[in-house]
Image (cartoon, helix red, strand yellow):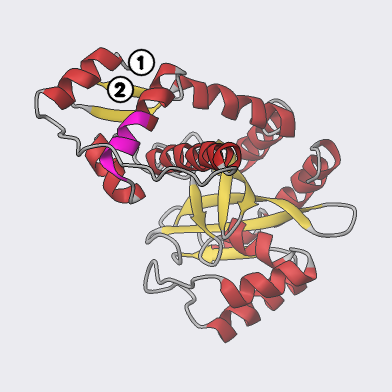
Amino acid sequence: MSVNQTTADNDVSSGQDPSPAPDQAAAPAPGEGKSARSADRTDMVGKALSLLVLLGDEPRGASAAEISRRAELPFSTTYRLLGSLTRDGFVDYEPDGRRYHLGLRIFQLGQRVSNHHGFAGTALPILRRVTDQTGEATILSVRDGHHHLTVNKVDGPQTFRVTSDPGHLGALHATAVGKALVAFAEDAEREALIEELDLAPLTDHTITDRAAFRAEMERVRRQGFAVMDEENENGMRAVAVPLLNAQGHAFASLATAVPVFRLSMEGLLAHVPLLQDAAAELAARLPQR
């Protein structure tokens, strides 16, 4: 539901989400007014974008006060930015719960990005074909900084489904798709990731030792695929292969994910040739970043 800013204003004025007094900006020095205003506008754009990123981590939405605290911005600044974002459709406002959500404008832009990179029309038939043959979920991911980003997924026919939906950001060190992306990154990038990633324990099986992670990356490069065995989520395992560009570096990765009760690791690895064939086809068809 799109925001009714009058409703939002009434929420604040009625004391439901009180706002402190607006910040008092210092007057610019003579001759610095124009540059100061330009810098301020740029800073506000960055702050608005940071609010969108925060809302992306809140599937049930968040109040202005919660967003303000998480963004470490004054409430008045947060409220004004949310008002601008809602007017343009980037954010929706739910009056009943006084919560903000990402708007359909974000979805529209996301679909355009997906179409531009071929993640929707080009990739989807290939992912469906893999799922038809494995009977399990097929996932396509790319690297986004120190995370992997799920860009497309096809669920299998089974009732137990994988929860890594498009738009999901996950750990590089604890997932099969993430390991494939790191292991086959450009040499300097791979070394930086191995040294800089936060190897946080997500389960009892997560690799948290940096030397062990380096050895894992070398193993992935030797064998040409990566596995995850309850390292990211208890009860789940996966195998992934890289999509390689002309230089032999990964620009995406493709995985099959299954619950441990349904398929052994040996059975999962039997799908590697199928994934490699699909990855080669995708690499030939998708724009390479």
Q: Is residue 159 visible?
A: yes
* 143 and 216: which is toward the camera: 143
Tell me if residue 86 comes above or below residue 71 in the rendering. Answer: above
Left/right placement of residue 237 relative to residue 73 reads: right
Q: Position of residue 280 (x, y in %)?
A: 82, 47
At x 38% / y 38%, what residue is drawn?
55
- Compared to 258, does 12 lie above or below? above
Q: Quadrant of residue 225?
A: bottom right
Residue 262 part of the magenta segment = no
Residue 247 occupies quadrant: bottom right
Which residue was labeled with disc 2? 93
The picture places residue 182, in percent across and down from the top left corner, at 66, 65
Residues in magenta? 74-80
Mark 1 — residue?
2
Q: Amino acid at mark 1?
A: Ser
Residue nearest the viewer, comparing 224 with 131 = 224
